[in-house]
Each structure stands twice: as structure tokens, then as C-alpha cells.
Image (spheres, rainbow, N blue to C red):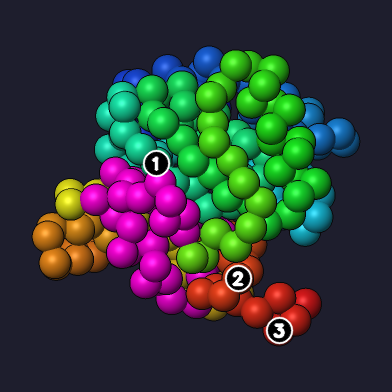
Amino acid sequence: MISLLKDRGISDAKILAVMARVDRHLFVPEPFTNRSYEDSALPIGKGQTISQPYTVAFMTQALGVKAGDRILEIGTGSGYQAAILAELGARVFSIERNLDLLAGARRMFDRFGYRIVTKGGDGTVGWNEYAPFNSIIVTAGAPEVPQPLLAQLADGGKLVIPVGGLDTQTLIICTRFGGRIDRREVQGFKFVPLIGKMGWNKTGVD
């Protein structure tokens, strides 16, 4: 898996070391654990997936994570992405709308001693109580960039979010410079839909 990430352009040595250290198979349910180190997204139940390793690595590298950064994650899912961020020394805050998935992720965090702050709810409106954040990472595809998330970015902070239709999305990397937001786009990603007030309507998606 690590060789594949290097071949695909992941060059941050700290990210590669962390992804070699965190056992992805522990975050993948049966009967998919034998595929844990393939570069593919895998089902984790409740219509959700654990993102493919390249996507996790690419989004993490795009954030430019530094030890001590306050990072908001929208979509806790299996907990794997949050674990990677915590291993990099970030202070992670994570929101998950599905309470069963959240409970499972919390068990993993407790198991490994990660001090990750979590809650169940609508991640599309962010978590204003703990804002501003140095980075915000969204692990589901949105129809557009939610304005509340941009508003909760610290100066110099980055938001990484997939935006597009329900089939494929473009990864948008937004960086705040005072009152200005710079955007960079990377094509060719696929995520489950981001459900919520500032995302997709669940009825429409179903």
C-alpha cells in the first residue's frame, strides 16, 4: 500500500509513516478485511465507505497538517481518517450523522487512546463552538462548498471537500487569506453523498 501511495505522488514522509503504522484492517468490517490494503473504498455499513488509502493520503497531504493543528472532520465514518490525523499530532474534532457508525469509531478511538472530540449531528453546518479551525476535511461529496465551513476556517486555514454530482466529484481545496478564499481543484474523485442542511437532501439521494 505504501509503495502504491509513493508511486501515485504522495511524498510527505510523515503521512507515509503514519499510514504504515495505523492498521487499516482494524477499521474495515468482515468480510472485507482481506481487502484492507487494496487501494479501494470499502463498505463499512449504513451505506457508507472507508475511503481508499490514496484518497486519505491525498486529502491529508493537501491539508498540510502540523502538530497541534485544530482540525474539523465532517464524516467520522470508520474513524480511520481521524486516526491518521491524530497520529500526525492534530487536535481532531469529528462529526458523524449516523450514530451507529459514531459509536463504532468511538470504540476504536478509546482502544488506541486517541483524544478525538466527537459528536453526532449535521456536519454541513460545522462546529462553531470549537472554531476557528486550522483545517477542515469533508469525507463526503457535497453539491457545493458549505459557507458555514468556510466561515469557521482560521486565517491561513484550508478546507478540503469533494464537490459535484452524486456520481463523481472534484476535490476543492480552499485556503483562507483574511477575507479572501483561494480555490484549487483536482479532478476525479468519488465519495458517498454529504447529507445535511448545506449538503444533499437524504430523501432526494435515496
Residue 135 makes an appearance in the image: yes
- Residue 148 colored magenta? yes
Q: In which quadrant of the rendered image does the N terminus lie?
A: top right
Q: Is residue 11 left or right of residue 162?
A: left
**What residue did someone put label 3 on?**
204
Q: Which residues are magenta?
A: 126-154
Report the number of numbered marks. 3
Q: Residue at x 56, y 22 (%)?
A: 114
**What residue did someone put label 2 on?**
196
Amino acid at pointer 2: Gly
Amino acid at pointer 1: Ile
Residue 94 x, y percent position in the rendering = 54, 44
Amino acid at pointer 3: Gly
Q: In front: mark 3 or mark 2?
A: 2
Q: Residues within 10 Å of mark 2 (few under 14, many from 20)?
A: some
- Residue 185 colored magenta? no
Residue 155 x, y percent position in the rendering = 18, 52
Separation of disc 3 and disc 1 at Cα? 30 Å
What label does residue 139 carry, if any? Answer: none
Q: Residue at x 60, y 34 (%)?
A: 80
> Is disc 3 placed on a helix, strand or loop?
helix
